[in-house]
Image (cartoon, rainbow, N blue to C red):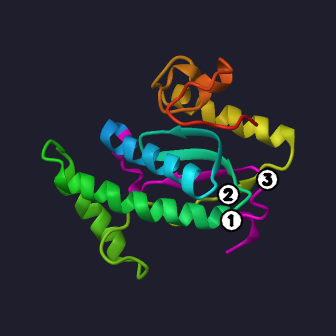
Amino acid sequence: MSSKYKTEESEIPHFVTCTVVGWVDVFSRELYKEIVVKSLAYCQQSKGLCLRAYVIMTNHLHLIVSSSSHPISEIMRDFKKYTSKQIIAAIESNEKESRKEWMLNLFRFVGSTNSANKEYQFWQQGFHPVQLDNVEKQQQRLRYLHENPVRAGIVWLPHEYKYSSAYQYYHVKDEGILPILHL
């Protein structure tokens, strides 16, 4: 793996991306987004994750994170492992999920092609960290992250999207679904 996909100094903010295999729009359902939110909150409280910014899209999420107590790579590994199990279980038990068979078959097929999996693979491997070691990089990635829902046609303005830290940045308030530490 090249060094551009490894976290270096975890205290420095990193832009990371987690993508669902096959770009499946799992997070079009609030139930599955809430699993991600609860897991991020747990990582903040128990693993030293410093969440600087976030957006949860329908098939991927972008985060700007740092940590002074644990390597970002370990936090992300644990986050992805836990959320994949929880989301798969939620899909399996969701009687109202019209896409259940299709999604589980896809996740099972991808999992069968990867020896690191027991049965399913939910997230694409890696999380593509980019070290944000100056203000220009931080602001560019922050804009990119917050404008994702606008580019996708979900909202007109970044701060209108519930599953994003944009409201906290645009209104300079701590009210949001997850606490953040501003860049």
Q: What x and y, as percent, mark residue 27?
A: 37, 42
Q: Is residue 28 magenta?
A: no
Determine whether the residue tagged by mark 3 lies in a helix, strand or loop: loop
Ranked by sequence position, the earlier of labels 2 and 3 is: 3
**Which residue is at 65% across, 17% downward?**
171
| Depicted 130 relative to depicted 107: above or below | above
> From this viewpoint, is residue 103 visible?
no
The label on residue 71 is 1
Distance from disc 2 to disc 3, alpha carbons, whole Å, reads 11 Å
Please give left or right for residue 80 compared with residue 179 in the image: left
Q: What x and y, as percent, mark residue 146?
A: 61, 31
Query: Which residue is identified by label 2?
Result: 129
**Which residue is at 78% across, 40% downward?**
138
Distance from disc 1 to disc 2, alpha carbons, whole Å, reads 12 Å
Question: What is the quadrant of the N terminus in the image?
Answer: bottom right
Amino acid type of disc 3?
Ile
Residue 83 falls in image quadrant = bottom left
Residue sitting farthest toward the bottom? 115
User: Magenta residues?
Assistant: 1-27
